[in-house]
Image (cartoon, helix red, strand yellow):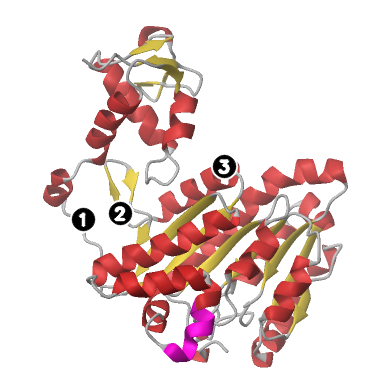
Amino acid sequence: MANDSFFDEQKEQSLIKARIVEKYFWAWAKVIIPTAKKAGYKIAYIDLFAGPGRYQDGSKSTPIKVLERAITDPDMRNMLKTLFNDANSLHTNSLQETIDLIPGIETLKYKPVVVNYEVGDNIVQAFQQLNLVPTLFFVDPWGYKGLSLQLINSVVRNWGCDCLFFFNYNRINMGLGNTVVEGHINALFGKVRAYKLREQLQALNSEERELTIVEAICEALQEMGGEYVLPFRFKHENGNRTSHHLIFVSKHFKGYEIMKEIMAKESSEQNQGVPSFEYNSATSIQPLLFELYRPLDELEAILLDEFAGQTITMQEIYMRHNIGRRYIKKNYKTVLSNLEMQDKITAEPPADKRRKMKGEITFADSVKVTFPIKL
């Protein structure tokens, strides 16, 4: 059961998390709906740890924001199915009451379903037996009970299905050394990987532990078939330690690209326009320190090395290089423009043939780039 104090007020971190989910739900639905309509599919949003309808301070919870957004769109009103679950009956009662009060809720063709179950093997088995319609799946447990690779895979194995889940780093880090919760940890990482991870962590410092643990869950998800995995880190209010991650899983590059842009905009830091994929309310921008690490300069050198002797479009460079890196599309366009200005690459059409926007020469996805051969 979730810690009720978590819902007493919507802290800034929770607001960012809810905003990421809401933004992605809208963007995902807009991409999926045209194909789903042609195939006669519905679309769905499932939240297995939905919480109450509102926080104690009156702030709307994520389910309410998703439903309000859906009501504004004719296609979603006609196609969206929603399932909200929570093991705490006080939460589901609050959620149902809040849903019933949403203006226009009756315009949804499919009434939101609110249920009260403990998340475990029974739900995994039920999902595994279904061929789900395109679904955005949100899993936000307070700790890790109920969260497993099998649960995530039971949804994302279906076409058009993506997952966002709350990875409580602090509790999972402690749980890895606790035999009492060994079964839950094994379900999350897989038994063999969890055993190896426990062995690895013994000689690592705190920073190395975090990187190793997050890398392990990302690898497990990719092996399961979630080819595109993207973690977003939240720091404690004092800015010293990680509290949790929000991890996105998809089998499709388009979803990864959309989520990467959303998470980039929610990052509390950007260095040379390169996002941190981290929210840290204690961050103070220090230009001098930023200048000591210049990620765009680094990207210039990487591209000149990795694509030496090749002629390739901007889009192909981006597609082949950005997976698993912090760079977003505009970073590649900026770097390629800089390299062209320095005569380190050639582009077709060249800069003087391309149009200007906001005083800058554009670098379209279709521009062909020729990199010099390494000497």
- Residue 241's place in the image compared with 301, above or below, is below
Where are the magenta residues, as a range? 179-185
Q: Is residue 116 left or right of residue 259?
A: right
Could you say where residue 201 lies in the image, as x and y percent from the top left? 30, 72
Identify which residue is drawn at 59% across, 52% down: 250
The residue under label 2 is 269
Q: Is residue 122 left or right of residue 49?
A: right
Dot 2 falls on a residue whose secondary structure is loop
Q: Is residue 343 visible?
A: yes
The residue under label 1 is 285
Identify which residue is drawn at 41% across, 83% down: 175
Q: Earlier in the sequence, mark 1 or mark 3?
A: 3
Q: Are marks 2 and 1 in contact (CB under 8 Å)?
A: yes
The residue under label 3 is 253
Label 2 and label 3: CA atoms lie apart by 25 Å
Which amino acid lies under the numbered mark 3 shown in the image of this protein? Phe
Dot 1 falls on a residue whose secondary structure is loop
